[in-house]
Amino acid sequence: MTIGVKLNILNRNILRFLYGFAYEPSTDDYLVVVGSYKCYNDYDRVSSLINLEIFSLRANKWKQVEVGFHLPYMVINTNRPSNKVGLFLNGAIHWVVHNHETNIVVIIALALKETTISEIALPNDFCVTYSIQYDLLVLDGLISAWTVDMDTVEIWVMQEYAVHSSWIKTLVFSIRPDPDFFLVYFTNCGDIVGTDGHDELVKFNYTKASC
Amino acid sequence: MAKRRSVHLLPEVITEILLRLPVKYVLRYRCVCKSWLSLISHPNFATLHFHLAASPTHNLLSIGNDCFPETLSIDFDASLNGDSAYVPPILDFMDHQQHPQIGGSCRGFVFLHSDKGFYLWNPSTGVHKQIPRSPI
């Protein structure tokens, strides 16, 4: 006798993660942040809200983040990286996410001292789709958002923290032949460093000054 | 034969000099003698060194997962030529089956997540600490 077991593989939930690591000077503590949510395995449909937890190295304990409202966010999945690493700046960890209730792509900022979450709007023309690489970086101490769409790189800088009108498109350039360019760092010398998708690092200089 | 002159520096002076050197030299100088080893290994030294660092460096750390966790580190603010990639930090507490990935970095420490758990790692000294799993 055979017992048939039907496995509903297509609707299996997959856990997805947001990560962050930060230093909080007021408590002289290192904090690890892990956000998790479930989605179906086609990756673009979410089946849960984000659950955020913080680990304090000093207390050696995990704590669930209670922000008083639910967090309807997910990462728009591009080729890589599969889980999102947050940008630590101004005492907060920042991730670019899709709010699936308002259907808007925003930055969410987790302020570590206050343990609060707020949304920071991206520039109006900032376009993120499944075919576009994007993320946040620090440029001259300010939050910068970048996209790579085919062979065009766009770099925006938020001149004043959390002020939407202060976003300025600082640089647009083309790379040919179009590599699978993913930005990693802005150097002090005005270089843009990225990976080309073939285990090589590429750098572009966007100022005339050189070190 | 020329007579060798030995120079005696006060311990405080040696400390002040070591505090002003880049981290990779300081770590190498732990092998000079026992007193330098204990001086450099003291937790206060690391804190003072971090705060005094005249020009903090920015390194790209890459972990490959092809067959073993191969690491590579490059100093961004150097010229990005091949020779700026110095001795890679050794990730010897994990194997490739754990698929270690970087979840963030801050003040010289790296947060690694893997199939088997979470770790905080200092790539300069090789010291690591496993973080307990979340009970939530």
Image: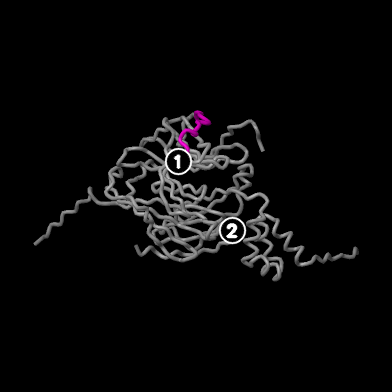
Foreground pick, A159 / A147: A159
**Residue depicted at 42% across the width and 38% down the height:** A121
Foreground pick, B85 / A52: A52
The circle on residue B120 is none
Return the chain for callout 2. B
Is circle 1 on the same chain as circle 2?
no
Residue A92: x %, y % from top left: 48, 49
Please state which amino acid type lies under the numbered disc 1: Asp
- Asked if A84 appears above or below B100 in the picture, the reply is above
Q: State how far apart marks 1 and 2 are (Cα).
A: 27 Å
Q: Which residue is mark 2?
A: B124
Give yes or no for residue A171 being in the magenta stretch.
yes
* Secondary element at image label 1: strand
Asked which quadrant contains residue B136, the reply is: bottom left
Q: Which residue is mark 1?
A: A135
Foreground pick, A118 / A39: A118
Q: In the rendered structure, which segment of residues is drawn in magenta?
A: A162-175
Foreground pick, A151 / A93: A93
Q: Is residue A133 left or right of residue A141?
A: left
**Residue depicted at 32% across the width and 53% down the height:** A15
**Residue depicted at 28% across the width and 44% down the height:** A45
Please state which amino acid type lies under the numbered disc 2: Ser
Residue A194: x %, y % from top left: 51, 40
Determine crowd level at label 2: few under 14, some 14-19, many 20+ residues with C-alpha closer than 10 A. some
Furthest residue to the left?
A1
Q: Is residue B126 left or right of residue B28?
A: left
